[in-house]
Image (cartoon, rainbow, N blue to C red):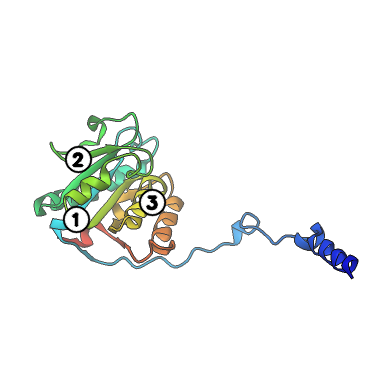
Amino acid sequence: MRKTWLAILFALLAPSSVIPAASAATIIDEWASVQPPPAPVLKPAKVDPKTTALLILDIVRQGCNAERRPRCLDTLPAVHTLLDRARAAGVMVGYSLVRGATAADILPPVAPLGGEPMVTSGTDKFLGTDLEATLKAKGIKTVIILGVVAQGAVLTTATEAALRGFEVVVPVDGVSSDSVYAEQFTAWNLLNAPVIAGHVALTRSDMIGF
């Protein structure tokens, strides 16, 4: 009897019984057949100026220029107008820089004023910085996040903000990348990723009310 059970156990553990003989097609195999989902509907976002911060991520000359990311330059008018409206409403404004950049590298249309906080980090602007402490010290509950790169700083920082308990508003006309696919992926992911879905609102800069 013991030999019989041992034989069954060995049979069950044999590679041929654990690993299928033929694997299913991967996403790489099916890449060309994938169809994008319908575009999300942008919704108005009404925020409280006293508990909201506008975070402008990495709009610096090193990465926002005609050679590397011309789409970033296209966002500047919308970002500039939103920045003016936010300041007029008393919204906290903060900035981030890529490593090696300084405040002087931020493009003039969206340049900071004296006293507006700034952090320097990689894609996650919370990592290794005092961003969360600064926001919470000001009683911030909602962050408006825009900038470059969509699939980098914007996606990562928005995700982290939601995971840290903030509500997140992302105006898509203020977000850019190297390609439209990266921007599309970012928009989809922000609305569909587990946990953060429901804490991120996609909108347009002129649909944000203070």
Q: Which label's residue is closer to the chain start, 3 or 2?
A: 2
SS label for mark 3: helix
Position of residue 117 in the picture relative to residue 165 (left or right): left
Distance from disc 2 to disc 1, alpha carbons, whole Å, reads: 14 Å
x, y (%) of residue 80? 20, 46
Position of residue 61 in the picture relative to residue 47 (left or right): right
SS label for mark 1: strand
Pointers 3 and 2 in contact (C-beta within 8 Å): no
Q: Which label's residue is closer to the chain start, 3 or 1?
A: 1
x, y (%) of residue 25? 68, 60
Q: Which mark is residue 52?
A: 1
- Look at label 1 and name its amino acid: Thr
Q: Which label's residue is closer to the chain start, 2 or 1?
A: 1
128 in relation to 144, above or below: above
Q: Residue at x 26, y 31 (%)?
A: 105
Position of residue 185 in the picture relative to residue 108 (left or right): right
In the depicted view, which residue is nearer to us: 53 or 78? 53
29 in relation to 75, above or below: below
SS label for mark 2: loop
Q: Quadrant of residue 130?
A: top left
Indicate the quadrant containing the C terminus: top left, top right, bottom left or bottom right.
Answer: bottom left
How many numbered marks appear?
Answer: 3
- Look at label 2 and name its amino acid: Pro
User: Badge 3, how many Cα within 10 Å: few under 14, some, many 20+?
Assistant: many
x, y (%) of residue 185? 45, 56
142 in relation to 57, above or below: below
- Look at label 3 and name its amino acid: Leu
Say which of marks 3 and 2 sits in front: 2
Residue denoted by label 2: 117
Q: Which mark is residue 155?
A: 3
Q: Which mark is residue 152?
A: none
